[in-house]
Image: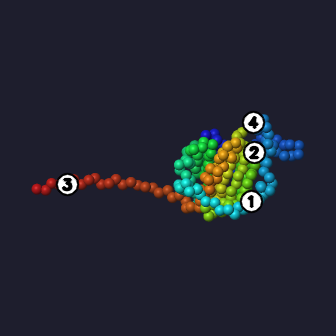
Amino acid sequence: MKKIILIAFVAVSFSTKAQTKAMTEDGKEVVLLDNKTWKFVNESDEKTLETISTNDQTYEKAKEATFLMKSKRVEGGVYYNPKVWRIIKSDINFPAIEHVFTNSTNPNIFALFISENAPIQTLKNLKELVIAGVQKNATYFRLKEAEYRTINDIKVLHMKYSVNAKGIDLEYMGNYYLTGDGYCSITAYTFVNKYEENKKAMESFINGIANVEKSQVTEIIEVAPPPPMSSKKTK
């Protein structure tokens, strides 16, 4: 499990990393995969990369999503079902990720709660940053969908994309929300061959994204009760 989570960290990172790639005769980049097959480095349709459609349907969190996890950095959070999803600890150093989730009923689904204090002006700018980061850190990338949605009364960017990272094919689905001092994203992912059976659960989880106040850490000091008073016998 730790290996899969690490791959996901690499795939969503905004950092740069060199890749070994080749060129076809007509100048297109390709990558040779571990199974001796090859793919174009970027198979996204040009229109999909350039445009963001608008979905007029409104979305809400699932009724079972009763537990709220707030960000400590920005005004964002996620509602989720604590009976199905659980937060796990990770010793991988990637500061933008606040929480890592696993699905207790399905070991093939994972999710990330990411936030950063970054001066990003628009969701379109955020889309470009996400795509650039994924392309630089994955051997293969394909953007499948990008659209504006209204979820829990906030405007978000919804994206679906495929990547190959470290020889593993993964499908991602994420909601991205701009806050007053940065952004918050809730992203779920699974293996390509498990996507169709898991996409409903993935979308249900990421639809828990919400505009909420930052988490306030309060120190609770317990004061020991005074010792019982001894009673005096009176004559």
Distance (Cα) linking label 3 and label 1: 78 Å
The amino acid sitting under disc 3 is Ser
Q: Residue furthest left?
A: 235
Q: Which residue is disc 4 drawn over?
A: 34
Give neighbour class at mark 3: few <14, some 14-19, many 20+ (Cα, 10 Å). few
Give neighbour class at mark 1: few <14, some 14-19, many 20+ (Cα, 10 Å). some
Distance (Cα) linking label 1 and label 2: 21 Å
Distance (Cα) linking label 4 and label 2: 12 Å
Q: Which residue is disc 3 drawn over?
A: 231
Q: Which residue is disc 2 drawn over?
A: 140
Identify the mark nearer the N-term, 4 or 1.
Answer: 4
Q: Residue at x 55, y 61 (%)?
A: 213
Distance (Cα) linking label 3 and label 2: 79 Å
The amino acid sitting under disc 1 is Ile
The amino acid sitting under disc 2 is Tyr
User: In this picture, is 168 found above or below 45?
Assistant: above
Q: Name the secondary structure under disc 2.
A: strand
The amino acid sitting under disc 4 is Asp
